Amino acid sequence: MFDSSEKRRMLSRWIIGTVACCILIYLGIRHIVNVAEAALWAVNQVKPLLIGVVLALILNVPMTLWESFLKKRLGMHKGVRALSITLSLLLVFGIFIAVAFLVIPELANALKLLVEILSDWLDKLARMDTSELLQETPFAAALTQIDIDWLSMKTQLEQWARNQSGVFVEQVMGAAGSVVSSTISGFIGLIFAIYIVSSKETLKRQTARLIRAWLPRRPGETLIHVCSVCAKIFRQFVAGQTIEAIILGTLCMAGMLLLQLPYAPMIGALVGVSALIPIVGAFVGTIVGTVMILTVSPVKAVVFIVFLLVLQQLEGNLIYPRVVGSKINLPAIWVLAAVTVGGNLAGPLGMLLGVPTASAGYALLKEATLDRERILRRFPRS
């Protein structure tokens, strides 16, 4: 039992803590702009480290699989961690580099060819305005009422293409500095990620010791549990999303080959990689694939759109819920919300990380709600 003096000290600490929290909340709301700027400044200062943490979480998934394979199948024990990290880096970056080399040159050629086709069509339409064959049609009188300067449209299209190419070059030159800065940050983050995955057991043990030594028991154990749940869900999400992307890309390539559509391997790889970003990635793959096929045949482009819409419905209703949905256990409406908010905050990276972050929050909130309901059943409110 506490004596009266101990009770007064506990009450005083509670009152002081409550008042301090209220003051901090008030000041934070009153100076929300300054707080946001300070937060962004702090994030920018540790940006390479944050990139390293994200890369470490991604690399940890294939690295764990490689370690298990090398130990069980090949009986290796020395140098397994270093070899697993090397193979994981080659696998992850090799996929993205290969897809980039496959898609970007062909996409540039497709856009150039599309502009040439449009220019040729405008030439033909301009010649049709004065052709005798057009004048003999039943709709000649109505068609002559439509005054369209096709040659002027062609000139404007060519001028726009030239202007856009110049603007693109200027933007590329202007972004060179930011690209160099991002490359340096990414390289530092990669080194940091390699250090994390190579010493993950030691770092995990040391972090747990620090939390238990410097934080009160209950908040410390809660923080350790939260970190454990987040790491588990992110690992499951990366594994499930990768499997789903491989399945979707393979089905897309196989279907395009059966329908005799062009660029089947290339677009299949693009659709698979873009599927790593939930919801939005499918639209990116559809748009880029349609532009590329449109340069070959507009009819085949329409067939591709219909095929991919059917495939996306199959993927969304059968593949994704079983491969990814069962792992992250997040309702579809919250997946959409997570992708939207994450994209607005951090672009494509935010879209990728938004779903596992929301899933971890959803799991922790559900767990806390169940604990709260269990307490209320034992001690109902008066």
Image (cartoon, rainbow, N blue to C red):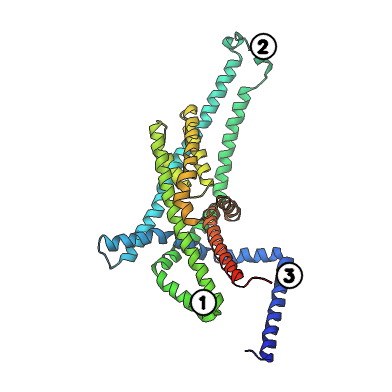
As measured in the structure, the alpha-carbon distance from the residue carrying label 1 to the one carrying label 3 is 29 Å
Q: Name the residue under label 2.
A: 141
Badge number at residue 325: none
Numbered disc in front, either 1 or 2: 1
Q: In this view, does 177 lie to the left or right of 204?
A: right
> Residue at the location (57% across, 23% down)?
122
Badge number at residue 26: 3
Q: How crowded is mark 3: few (under 14 residues within 10 Å), some or many (20 or more)?
A: few
Amino acid residing under circle 3: Tyr
As measured in the structure, the alpha-carbon distance from the residue carrying label 3 to the one carrying label 2 is 74 Å
Mark 3 or 2 closer to N-term? Answer: 3
Q: In this view, does 279 lie to the left or right of 246?
A: right
Q: Mark 1 points at which residue?
A: 211
Q: Is residue 83 left or right of residue 203?
A: left
Q: Which of these two is toward me, 204 or 298?
A: 204
Residue 257 placement (x, y as % from top left): 38, 34
